[in-house]
Amino acid sequence: MPMYKKIAKLILFILFTINIFNVSYADYPNTSIAVIDINLILAEAKSAKKAAKEIEEIAVNIENEIQKSDEEMLGEQNLLIESQAIMAPEAFENKRNDYEKKVQNYNIERQNKLLSIENLIANSRKQVLDALKPILEEISNEKGITIVLEKNTVLLNAEAMDITEEVLKKLDKALPKIELSQE
């Protein structure tokens, strides 16, 4: 089908859809739209910045622990290899099996430590988003906003529609600190 026919069908569909919605337009409130940049808020909120700094410190400590444990495991592996020549085959096999179990447990523990960092990040993000909802409701009620859209999904908007800075100021007051808990 030629492109102009596809476009014509799309235009007819849009017009038809608009006509359907115009019939019951009186039932809907006047629409006022605002946009908010969630990524900016997650990056610039004072509590989020503090949490990011704490998480980074925790991550560095975990990475140092992992590096130290990696070195210890490598040392044990080298000792096992060296002892192979002087041990009876059965004794070596038992020692090798013990080492393999230890490596499996270590890998699980290592993954859990790395996952804990991801959980801290997700938890801090959730706390910000949870604190954001009542603020958005308050601003929406004050300004008569009926729809709030994420700025990343909007192609073009007037600057007056952007409530990010106002939300950020209220969020900084409402959520001065994010509680981080390592599980």
Image (tube, rainbow, N blue to C red):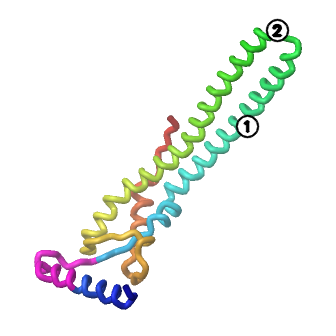
Type of amino acid under label 2 = Ala
Q: Is residue 153 magenta?
A: no
Quick one: SS at disc 1?
A: helix
Quick one: SS at disc 2?
A: loop
Taking the image as drawn, is residue 23 in sight? yes
- Which residue is denoted by mark 1 in the rendering? 67
Q: Which residues are magenta?
A: 16-32
Distance from the alpha carbon under mark 2 to that under mark 1: 32 Å
Residue 62 figure quarter: top right
**Residue 74 at x, y percent in the picture:** 78, 30
Residue drawn at the location 73% of the way across and 37% of the way down? 67
Q: Residues within 10 Å of mark 1 (few under 14, many from 20)?
A: few
Query: Which of the marked residues, 2 or 1, is nearer the chain's N terminus?
Result: 1
Q: Main secondary structure of the magenta part?
A: helix
Q: Is residue 31 magenta?
A: yes
Taking the image as drawn, is residue 165 in sight? no
Residue drawn at the location 63% of the way across and 27% of the way down? 104
- Which residue is denoted by mark 2 in the rendering? 88
**Residue 136 at x, y percent in the picture:** 33, 64
Residue 142 figure quarter: bottom left
Is 47 placed above or below 166 here? above
Q: Are marks 2 and 1 in contact (CB under 8 Å)?
A: no
Residue drawn at the location 29% of the way across and 71% of the way down? 147
Return the residue nearer the eye: 7 or 84: 7
**Residue 145 at x, y percent in the picture:** 27, 73
**Residue 182 at x, y percent in the picture:** 52, 37
